[in-house]
Amino acid sequence: MAGKLQFSLVSPERELFSGEVDQVDAPGSEGDFGVLPGHAPFMTALREGQLRLYRNSQVTTFEVRGGFADVTPAGLTVLAESAVEV
């Protein structure tokens, strides 16, 4: 699918990432999920695990612990209880 996904990762301490990406894979409470540009809107709780963002053939990984993911027509926002780049 063409285009980019607007993605923001926020923890209580600070915003860890904000920008356009190709794809995000996250640890949902009901199982892992991936979000691409144009994904249908939904909201879910997160469990502990690795969140991976893909952009320009590079992968960045964050260890997240809890929180929420919100997919809207504008993009994906992850509000994590804790997040650290690994």
Image: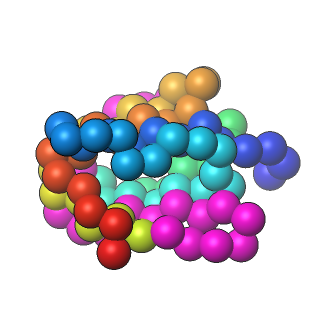
Q: Position of residue 70 (x, y in %)?
A: 39, 33
80 versus 22 height, above or below = above
Q: Position of residue 58 (x, y in %)?
A: 64, 73
Quadrant in the picture for residue 47? bottom left
Task: Using the rendered image of the protein, determine whether residue 14 is visible from the camera's viewpoint.
Answer: yes
24 versus 80 height, above or below = below
Q: Where is residue 6 in the image (x, y as percent from the top left)?
A: 60, 37
| Residue at horizontal 34 percent and vertical 66 percent from the top | 85
Q: Report the span colored magenta.
A: 39-60
Name the colour scheme: rainbow
Q: How many labels does the image show?
A: 0
Residue 49 shown left or right of residue 61 in the figure: left
Task: Using the rendered image of the protein, determine whether residue 30 is visible from the camera's viewpoint.
Answer: no
| Residue at horizontal 59 percent and vertical 42 percent from the top | 19
Q: In which quadrant is the C terminus drawn?
A: bottom left
Farthest-out residue, top: 73
Assess whether residue 54 is covered by the magenta stretch.
yes
Residue 24 shown left or right of residue 81 in the figure: right
| Residue at horizontal 24 percent and vertical 56 percent from the top | 83
| Residue at horizontal 84 percent and vertical 48 percent from the top | 2
